[in-house]
Amino acid sequence: MKWVLDSAAINYVATQSRNYNAAFNRLTELVNGGELTFCDQVVAELERTAEGEPGPLWAATVKDQRADPGATYSAQRWVLSNVEDIVDDDDPVDAAPYVVAHAKSLQDEGESEITVVTEDTADKPTRKAIRTVCAQLAIPCLSVADMMQACGHQWP
Amino acid sequence: MPRATLVPITPSVLEWAIEQAGVEIEDLAKRSGAEPQQVAAWLAGDAQPSKTQFRKLVTFLKRPEAFFFLPRPPSREAVPAAFRHPPGGMREPTRIELEGIRKARRVQQVGRWVAERVEDDRWRENPIPAANGKTPHEAAKAAKAWLGWSLQDQRQASSSAAVVRAIRERLEERGVLTLQLPLGSDGGRGFSLYDRDKPVVAINTHYNYEARLFSYIHELGHLMRRTDAICIGFAATKAERWCEAFAASFLIPIAALRDRVEFRLGEDAKVTEIDQLRPLAGDFRVSLSAMAIRLEELDFGRAGLFESIPTTSDFKRQGGGPGTDTTRGAVRLREFGEGYFGLILAGERAGALRRQDALRYLDVSEGQLRKLHNENVEPFEP
C-alpha cells in the first residue's frame, strides 16, 4: 500500500486533528517507510496557501525523505489526455494535476495499491476536484480520516 | 555528455498560450534561453524544449506546467479577440494589460459561479440601467439614480481617495466586481467586461485618484452599453467618445461647472491657464485633463487647454502613501476589491468552496487572511 497526499489533505491534518503533532509523526513514519509520498508541487502550493502553518512546515521537513519527487511527464500527459479539466489554466501553483499524475506514475512503475488521499472533494469553477478525477480514472481515493484509520491512527 | 531530458509539450497549446499572452517569439526565446529557430521547431512539433527551457517558458507565460500537456488548446479564449485587436486604430494591448484582462476574466468566472451558489442576485433586483438610445447626459442621470450618487458625494468627501472608495463601494454594493490593477505606465486607464450576473470593471492603479474616478464612471458607461471594452488613451471610437461624454456629464454637470467657473473667475470668463484649471478640477475631484476637456467642450475654456497639460499629470506619484499596508493580503484586497473578497468568503461559509479553494482564488495564505480578519476588514464583518 502506498498513499499519495495532496495539499488539502496535509492542511486538513494540521487544522482538523486534535493532536497534529502526533498525526504528523505518524505520517513521517509512513514517509520513512516508503508508504507515503507527495509531489514537489504540493510543497509549493502549501508554501503559498499556508505559509508558516504546520502543514507546509511538516512537508518541508520530510520532503527529502520521500522515495520520489513526483509525476513523470508521460504520466502528466496521460492524465490530461483523459481528463482535461483537472488543470486550472490560470493557476501555476495548483498541484491537483500533478497529484493525480503522481499516482499514475507510481502505478506505471509497478507499485501496488496506490491510493490518493485528498480533501479536494468538490468541483470548482476552474477545475474538477481531485476526487472526481480519480473516480474517472479508476484511481483509488480516500479521505484523511479513512486513511488515518486504515493506518491505525486514532483520528481526529 | 548526458542527454538533456526533453519535455513532450503539445505544440498547438504552446502556440495558443503565446498568442493569448501577446508575446513575440523572439522574446519568448530569449526568456527561455533558446534561439528563435528552436521555439519555431517546438511550435512545429519538430523539437521539444529541455527541462530548463520548459521551466523558464512556463514562468514567462504564467501557466501551469501541466497546461502544456493538454491534448489541445482550451476552446475558450483567455482574452477576447476584440481586446487583442482593438478597433478604431487603437494600439494592441501590452503584455501586462493582457495579464490583467486574464486575471479579471478569472475573477468574473469564479465570482459568477460563487454568486449562483450563494444566491447573490443583486443584479436581478437592481440591474445596471441600459444605455440603449440614451444620450450621454440622459444615461448619466440614470446612472446617478442607480448608484444613489450626487455631486455632494464628490464635493464633500474628505479626499479624492475617499471619493474613489465611495464610488467603488456603490458599484460593489450593486454587484459589480471592481478591480484595481497595476497595468503599467504605458497601459490603458481601464477596461470592462460585461456580464449580466457579474460585470467587472478594472482600473489602472498607475493613475492618480482623480483619473481613476473618471475611469470608473467611463467603464460604467461601457457596462451600460452592454459591451466589453479596453480603454487605451483618449477617445478613439464612437463608443469611447460616448463614454467620455457620459463620465463628464456624470462627474462635471454643466450647471454646476458654470457656477464654479463664475465663482472663481467671474461671469463669462474663460479658463485659459493651468493655474485656473487646478482649483476647478479639485472642486469636482477630477483630473486636470478631464476638466480641461470638459471646459473646452462647453466653451468655458480656451481651445488648446488640454494640450497644455503635462502628459504625466494623471499619473500617481511614485510610492505608496504613508501608512499604506503593503502586506500581500492587503495588496490583494485592494486589487480584487471587497466585493470579490466578500463573495469568495460567502462561498466558503455556504460550503460552495473549501478553505483551500478560497485561498487560491484570493491568492493569499491562511495567515494573511487571518490577519485581515483580525483587523476587521469589511468583508469579514458579520
Image: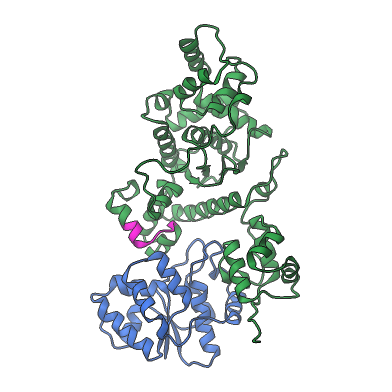
Quadrant in the picture for residue A1: bottom left
Is B381 situated above or below B236? below
Residue B19 quadrant? bottom right
Name which quarter of the figure residue A9 lies in.
Answer: bottom left
Identify the colour scheme used: by chain
Q: Position of residue B25 (x, y in %)?
A: 71, 61
Q: Residue at x 47, y 63 (%)?
A: A124
- Is B82 left, or right, of B102 in this rendering? right
Region of the chain picked out in magenta, as a range: B362-370
| Residue B164, position as x, y percentages in the image | 44, 35
Give left or right: position of B380 versus B93.
left
**Figure quadrant of the N terminus of chain B:** bottom right
Q: Nearer the viewer, residue B311 or B74?
A: B311
> In percent of the image, x 46 and y 27: which residue is there?
B285
Residue at figure coordinates x 48%, y 32% from the top left: B210
The chain drawn in green is B
Chief SS of the magenta region = helix
Q: Nearer the viewer, residue A66 or A150?
A: A66
**Residue under the image location 37 percent in, 66 percent down:** A50
Residue A93 location in percent, x, y? 49, 67
